[in-house]
Image (cartoon, coloured by chain):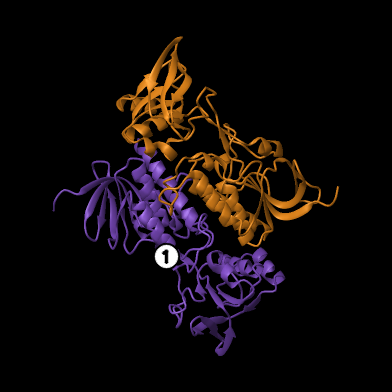
Chain colours: A orange, B purple
Amino acid sequence: MGESERHDLVVVGAGPAGMTAGMYGVRSGLDTLILEKGISGGLSNEAPEIENYPGFDRIGGMELASKIKEHVSRYVVIRELEKVVAIEASPEGDMVVTSDKDSYRTKAVVLCTGTRHRRLGVKGEDAFLGKGVSYCATCDGFFFKNKPVAVVGGGDSAAREALYLRKLGCMVTLIHRRDKLRAEPYLQQKLEEAGISIRWNSIIKEIRGDKVLRSVIIDTGGVESELAIAGLFVSIGEEPNSELAKEMGVSLDPHGYIITDRSQRTNLKGVYAAGDVTGGVRQVVVACAEGAIAALSAYNDLL
Amino acid sequence: MGESERHDLVVVGAGPAGMTAGMYGVRSGLDTLILEKGISGGLSNEAPEIENYPGFDRIGGMELASKIKEHVSRYVVIRELEKVVAIEASPEGDMVVTSDKDSYRTKAVVLCTGTRHRRLGVKGEDAFLGKGVSYCATCDGFFFKNKPVAVVGGGDSAAREALYLRKLGCMVTLIHRRDKLRAEPYLQQKLEEAGISIRWNSIIKEIRGDKVLRSVIIDTGGVESELAIAGLFVSIGEEPNSELAKEMGVSLDPHGYIITDRSQRTNLKGVYAAGDVTGGVRQVVVACAEGAIAALSAYNDLL
């Protein structure tokens, strides 16, 4: 084994947060490297169209991610298909980042590892992703204005998604596997006031359509029925990709999201986090902002 | 006087934060109005070029502001040249926003009133703005890479600007009116280590050049000298435009910036703040993100 490459800053993950952190790192004079286990763009690649990233009226999620990648690549190297498997403090006071391909020494790390959607795991879910199946009403709800949609889930997040869609004029059915919601009573009352019908004790068996989603097959206590909808919003939870952070000893909240202060610092010296893995509103512009702040904090701390 | 116009959300200020808040407000189903005392864009209009707003390689500050304005104007009305002079709680539980032209009833307010630069007030300062005179090294420093520049000021911010520019390879002179810096000792040591020369007891008398800045005339204890530089970074402080907030009873920090939580809520119910008036790193993408978060918080609170 030769000597490890040395950097000032290693960014883990090349979604909008990580890419922006990398650019700000280099622009602050830090020798910065981004490592990405898959391809750049993160979950923004999944958004069929993004209409609320300021400056772009309407752009495909993948196209926006690709524009940001092109932009930041003027400054920073992104190594794709390279998965970080461990980050450990070294006796010399810096850190050793070990990937499935190499290892690196660095003074600071920004964790931008994002989240993954909890999926239903039913037929049609992959096929109609972006063609009716969505995991984010704030992102995609506007495209279903005044149309019939269903939301799957029973927590605060599902209730909020349902209310958000109702406010956009959608006819909303909430589908929940139990006979009561976990959502707070206040939200439940709002659901009732908004006239949102709830299918209790119900699970989705299958998602059907042609070029786009047309209906779902619902199993209600053993009885199957078909519900015609234009959109299905799956809101059964996100899972932060925070396993690496946890192994490092980074403090997580009860849901597994990384806890940071407003400067994106974690509890560990030299370790910052940005984007969806820190929780929050899951918007591209917010992830970018957190990435920028994290890199500037690293720069200030290394000064 | 007729009945006041009624809205769910009034945004004060149409810089990047306010414009984004307006768009997110409308997209969340809130009847939203933006009031701007001057023209849209805020201080971003002053940045000669912005290279670090993710998605745009290089764009004039005014051009970016104009793109964002065009974008958000698909959703929200911006009334320019209308200055808000008071916001008061009404007996009915909502708020009355009074401008120099009209008055409005609203359930929620987002304050995006920004900051103003403290200026030197010397000859040439206006003429060379964007042609060598800058108020933000993080924004503009990259354009002066490896060139001679001066920073005016003696606080943490001036020291950080000087170090930032030095790291970019600039030959940096720090010009300070007193015989010692206010900047923290740690930063002062860094300045020394970085070989940044300091002109003590010195003030700028005049900024000179032709198409671009070429030099400054410095008065050091009554003796004038000329210093050839490509860039002059004025870092003698920002002043938050928080007078309106203060009158409303919004909590400010010791420097006059509005205090918010991570959801951009202030201490007052229904009152949110976003962008430079809340302090922080003064980057367009961060202002946009805070605007988005503020509007989503207003939406959630009004639910």
The residue shown at (52%, 55%) is B54
* For residue B46, above or below residue B228: above
The residue shown at (43%, 57%) is B277
Query: Who is closer to the viewer here, A191 or B212?
Result: B212
* For residue A212, above or below residue A83: above
The residue shown at (57%, 48%) is A17
* For residue B217, above or below residue B92: below
Residue furthest to the left: B1
For the question of whether residue A283 can be seen, the reply is: yes
Count of marks overlaid on the render: 1
Residue furthest to the front: A210
Q: Image quadrant of residue A97?
A: top right
For the question of whether residue A183 can be seen, the reply is: no
Q: Position of residue A25 (x, y in %)?
A: 63, 57
Q: Position of residue A242 (x, y in %)?
A: 63, 36
The residue shown at (69%, 58%) is A31
Please indicate whether residue A218 sits to the left or right of residue A246 in the image: left
Query: Dot 1 corresponds to which residue?
Result: B62
Residue furthest to the bottom: B223
Chain of the residue displaying label 1: B
Q: Position of residue B79 (x, y in %)?
A: 28, 57
Give the residue type at disc 1: Met
Mark 1, residues whose alpha carbon is within 10 Å: few (<14), some, or many (≥20)? many
Please indicate whether residue B159 sits to the left or right of residue A53 in the image: right
Q: Image quadrant of residue B91?
A: top left
Task: Please identify the quadrant where the C terminus of chain A is shown.
Answer: bottom right
Query: Helix, strand or loop at disc 1?
Result: helix
Residue furthest to the right: A1
Q: Image quadrant of residue A170?
A: top left
Q: Position of residue B75 (x, y in %)?
A: 33, 48
